[in-house]
Structures are given as C-alpha cells and as structure tokens.
Amino acid sequence: MNFLFDLLLNLLKVKKGKGICIFFTVTLLNSLTITLKLNAFNPFDNTITGVDANNIPITIKLDDIVSIKFAVGPCQSCKILAYVTNRNDNTVSVIDTATNTVLGSPIPVGLSPIGVAITPNGSKVYVANAGSNTVSVIDTATNTVLGGPIPVGLNPIGIAITPDGTRAYVVNAGSNTLSVINTTTDTVIGSPIPAGVAPFEIAITPDGTRAYVTNFDSTVSVIDTTTNTSLGISIPVGSVPFDIAITPDGTRAYVANFAQGTVSVINTTTNTPLGSPIPIGGVPSGIAITPDGTRAYVVNGINTISVIDIATNTVLGSPIPVGVAPLDVAITPDGTRAYVTNAEGTVSVIDTTTNTVLGSPIPVGSFPFRIAIGTIC
C-alpha cells in the first residue's frame, strides 16, 4: 500500500488551505463499500479517517481496503442543526449545534406543531401540526415553508421518514391511522393505514421495511412499509406508551411508557417483549438511542434524563438534571451530545461522554415539544 501513502500525502498537500476536500469510495474485504470525505491519513497505524454523509467519523485500516477511488472538489459547508417544534407558538425554532444558538426567527407552521422529522439528505423538515390536521414542509436551504400544508388525518402527532428518504409516515391520533407522504411530490399516497387506539409515535427500522407505532391502549402496532399494510400485530408494552426508538442494528425497539414510569424492550425479530420493563421513574415521554447503539436516553418528565445501558438493559448512574418538564430528546449524528426540550421554553444540552449538562439552557419558543437533529449541507 506504499503507493497509497504517497498519493494520500500529495492529495492532502493540495487540499491544505485551498478549501478543497478529498472524497473517497472504498470497497473493503467484507465487500462493504463506503464513501467518505477524507480528514486525515495516519501513516503510523496505516489508517485513513473521514466522515460519512451524516458527518459521523469513520476510521479504516488500509489493509482492509480492496479497492479505492478518489475525487477532489470544493468542500461542502455542512451544519448539524436541531429543529424544535414550539407547540404554543405554532412555530419551529432552529438551533445551530456548533454554537448552541438559535438561527434566525422561528419558522411559522400549522397549529400546535408536535412531531418533526428531517430527511436523510437534510433537504427538508416535516412537521406534524396536531391542531390543523396537516403537515408542513420546511426547506432547510432557506428555512421557509414549501407550498401549502399537506392535509392528513385527525390530530397528527408523530412523524418518521424512511431511511431512503422517499416517504414520511404520519401518526393520526384522532383517526387511529397513519398517512403516508411521498416526499418527492409532497402528496399523500394510498389510503390511511389502520393502527391501534389513539396512536402517538412511530419509528422505522434501519432497513426501512417496518414501522412500529405506539398506541394509547398499551400496545405497539407493526406496519409493513413495503405494502403499507398493518401486520395485525399488537405487542403488549407498559401503560400509555408515548415514544419509541429502534437500535441501529434494528434488533430491538425501546418504548417509553408514560403512565408506568418504565421502558419496554421489544425483540423486533419475534415482535415480542424482551424481559421485564426497565424501571425509570417519573413519566417518560421521549427516548433516543446513540448512533453506536450502546445507550438509550430517556426523558423522565421530572426534570431529569435517565440513561440505559443497552447491553444490560439497566439504568446507568444517577438521573441527569435538565430543565423544567422535559418532553423529548435527540442525539447528534456523532453521538457526543443529547438535546432535550423543556416545556418551560428551553433546550438543554448534555455531553454524552460525561453525562453532564453543558452551559445554560437554550431559549426557544413556547412549550417546545419534539426535536429532530440532522446534517444540513
């Protein structure tokens, strides 16, 4: 691999100070192909490091590379932004996570916005407006709303986007259904999909084949996203499940049970509960899993966040104090920080390495509810 050493060193010299980036696509011994933006070449341990499309750092050993292709071009300017729905203001606030400051003025959307999701390519944000039975679409290039709101079912609350970015699934709590939006045309496709009683939130598996929906009747429904039909499965969980998150490997789903103070774990292979619910305390309303799949961060609703070790399904350490009446949590693509919405009108930032709060809470709109974080280029 000596020729790679020389090539990489020369390319990095060209790159330095000229706003030029190196993009490489490698095929590994396990046949996996990865495209990254090159950050560094490490001759001492024969590795190259870069970031993927989600700005997540990756290190590759040169000995594991079967083939490699390079391209040199202008660096893309990307930001990691957090979008927060302000339920009482009918707006969305945007936080730049590099500076932990709010960008511009709040974006006006529909009535009582709750659910929010960002497309994988970072080009659009979809907002479920519970009070106007619509979904607003935000163009992240301008942070303005695109076109008119999309009509869906009654009282839309939860929203999730498929990993390929082609569809948005909207949970209609008042209709006991899901609406499916084509994200290219921003129109509803097909008929509403039946869910359980008063469905609230939704999570989609990493392979995009199934969606899991929490229902007020203490169950989780499973949707086949290839056919957009219910699989007729009602998985029993704790009382009043609010939020749900799926591990990056897709093997488990974690459910925050609001009225029980617990988190249920679902085996997604068998679609059955895995062990007993994990006691958390409080009224858990939001949950997010780190990109490496090692920990789940759970909003307690009693001004704290609990952390679950996914390997053992036990709570780690003491609860982390945040703002008043926290509601939701989202984690940055690199997994280093968790952002928590507090009903008092702020967002707290947690350092996930130390599990301590960073700085002062960030002021946003009135009654911030859900939050989504993505890479916007």
Image (cartoon, rainbow, N blue to C red):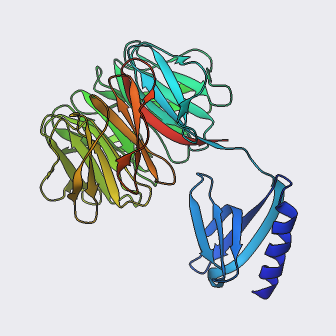
Where's the C terminus, which quadrant? top right
Q: Position of residue 295 (x, y in %)?
A: 33, 57
Q: Residue at point 59% right, 32% down? A: 124
Q: How many numbered discs?
A: 0
Residue shown at the point (26%, 55%) measured from the top left: 308
Q: Position of residue 25 (x, y in %)?
A: 71, 66
Q: Nearer the viewer, residue 62 or 197?
A: 62
Question: Which residue is the extreme one toward the front?
Answer: 359
Task: State left or right for residue 84 relative to residue 313.
Answer: right
Residue ID at (73%, 65%): 24
Q: Nearer the viewer, residue 122 or 148?
A: 122
Inspect this view and state whether residue 170 appears: no
Residue 59 in the figure: left or right of residue 346: right
Residue 376 percent across, percent down from the top left: 62, 40
Residue 158 visible in the snapshot: yes
Q: Nearer the viewer, residue 219 or 353?
A: 353
| Residue 6 image-quadrant placement | bottom right
Give the residue drawn at x 18%, y 58%. Answer: 274
Residue 23, image x and y in percent? 75, 61
Please give left or right for residue 109 compared with residue 317 in the image.
Answer: right
Q: Is residue 17 above or below residue 70?
A: above
